[in-house]
């Protein structure tokens, strides 16, 4: 097949593309940073952004981080986790890597076939005396079964930490999805619904947990002469925070544009044999972070054939998440990583394909992608 190439009529389409504000709106903020000479260490933009973000999300406490991986690392330390942590094999590898970095053992359990998030029934069966926490992921911004996971965590006295990297702005009937559990971690990576170039945040309702996380993200320094813990440098800088303030003013428009693209894909792909667009959940607000489809046996080319066809036409769809984390060399020897222990995740990983979606994607290009799929 020909290699992907971009042209004016049919540009190269990536699965995501960073949303950025007009440059002339960012330049005055850069001038302010230059004038202040405050580049990091919780400067004025950092403080303004942290408060504005908490207000926007409707949450109690926000700690800003240089990236979400550092936020996950610090959250696990702040929660005092040890031993085993139950998590999903169907996620970006950082979910499990942060556990390994903290000398915690991931215990993989299978996913629910509808939400593609952790199956609470499998979580229940996996809890042992060595379990210190459950680490679910709101995959694609789809909500985990928060009520059942909360009940499990309380019944067994374990912590509940959500990897909410995909879940910015998602709301259920009670409010922000981020209010659930002991804490949630957001990603502001360039590919996410809301970005600050790189960046992340830890969201929680407990002021003591928030305070511990803030200490840990700054080397454990409490004041000029006091170091209270073995921390790291995980702080968000002023450039990221200034961009974040601008981005907050645009995020509702971003959600609207993503929703239009999502609806267009569903309209154009309806009835394609063997292709399933994941049903929207009954949430008060979705963020349309990704547009995943499952390519089942009724689709002639199969998932990998469709993946190759799209790439040959300059459409860089992605197999999120394939391979499973549990199949990677550093995890595959764990007892919980056996494919027969993870039948749903194993099947979904062989079927899933995420199509291009970002706020600046023209609907004409959505139609082109749908036509390529429909004619495959």
Image (cartoon, grey):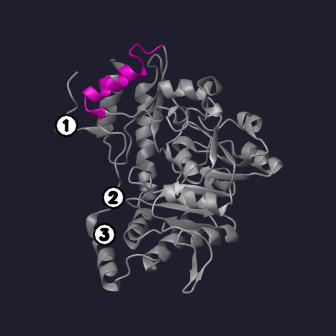
Where 142 falls versus 66 (above or below)?
above
Q: Is residue 118 visible?
A: yes
Q: Earlier in the sequence, mark 3 or mark 2?
A: 2
x, y percent for residue 85:
67, 46
User: Magenta includes 263?
Assistant: no
Residue 322 is labelled as: none
What predominant SS class does the magenta segment belong to?
A: helix
Residue 206: image quadrant is bottom right
Assign the C terminus to one quadrant of the image: top left
Q: Which residue is mark 1?
A: 6
Q: Cα distance, mark 1 to mark 3?
A: 30 Å
Secondary structure of residue under mark 2: loop
Q: Earlier in the sequence, mark 1 or mark 3?
A: 1
Q: Cα distance, mark 3 to mark 2?
A: 10 Å
Residue drawn at 62 percent across, 57 percent down: 76
Is 347 left, or right, of 292 in this rendering?
right
Secondary structure of residue under mark 1: loop
User: Magenta includes 314?
Assistant: yes
Residue 169: image quadrant is bottom right
Secondary structure of residue under mark 3: helix
Q: Which residues are magenta?
A: 298-315
Q: Nearest the camera: 238 or 294?
A: 238
Residue drawn at 52 percent across, 54 percent down: 168
Residue 342: image quadrant is top right
x, y percent for residue 13:
29, 38
Q: Which residue is mark 2?
A: 20
Q: Which residue is mark 3?
A: 25
Q: Earlier in the sequence, mark 2 or mark 1?
A: 1
Is 215 left, or right, of 287 in this rendering?
right
Assign the N terminus to one quadrant of the image: top left
The local crowd at label 3, few if under 14, some if 14 to 19, many if 20 or more residues have their Cα within 10 Å, is few
């Amino acid at each position: 097949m020909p290699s992907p190439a971009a042209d004016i009529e049919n540009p190269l389409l990536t699965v995501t593309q960073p949303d950025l504000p007009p440059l002339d709106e960012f330049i005055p903020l850069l001038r302010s940073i230059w004038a202040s000479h405050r580049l990091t260490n919780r400067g004025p933009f950092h403080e303004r952004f942290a408060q504005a973000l908490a207000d926007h999300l409707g949450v109690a406490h926000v700690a800003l981080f240089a990236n979400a991986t550092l936020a996950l690392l610090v959250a696990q330390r702040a929660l005092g986790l040890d031993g085993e942590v139950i998590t999903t094999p169907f996620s970006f590898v950082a979910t499990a890597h942060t556990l390994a970095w903290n000398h915690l053992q991931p215990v993989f359990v299978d996913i629910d076939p509808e939400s593609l998030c952790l199956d609470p029934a499998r979580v229940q069966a996996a809890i042992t005396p060595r379990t210190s926490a459950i680490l679910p992921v709101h995959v694609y911004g789809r909500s985990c079964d928060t009520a059942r996971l909360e009940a499990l965590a309380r019944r067994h006295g374990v912590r509940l930490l959500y990897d909410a990297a995909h879940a910015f702005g998602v709301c259920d009937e009670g409010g922000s999805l981020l209010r659930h559990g002991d804490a949630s971690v957001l990603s502001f990576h360039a590919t996410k619904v809301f970005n600050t170039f790189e960046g992340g945040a830890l969201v929680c309702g407990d002021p003591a947990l928030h305070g511990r996380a803030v200490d840990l993200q700054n080397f454990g320094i409490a004041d000029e002469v006091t170091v209270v813990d073995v921390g790291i440098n995980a702080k968000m800088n002023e450039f990221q925070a200034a961009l974040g303030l601008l981005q907050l003013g645009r995020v509702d428009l971003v959600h609207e544009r993503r929703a239009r693209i999502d609806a267009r894909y569903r309209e154009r792909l309806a009835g394609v044999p063997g292709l399933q667009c994941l049903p929207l959940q009954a949430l008060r607000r979705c963020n349309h972070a990704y547009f995943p489809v499952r390519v089942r046996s009724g689709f002639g080319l199969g998932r990998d054939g469709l993946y190759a066809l799209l790439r040959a036409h300059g459409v860089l769809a992605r197999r999120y998440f394939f391979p499973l984390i549990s199949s990677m060399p550093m995890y595959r020897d764990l007892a919980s990583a056996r494919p027969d222990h993870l039948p749903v995740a194993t099947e979904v990983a062989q079927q899933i394909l995420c199509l291009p979606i970002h706020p600046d994607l023209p609907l004409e290009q959505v139609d082109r992608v749908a036509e390529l799929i429909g004619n495959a």
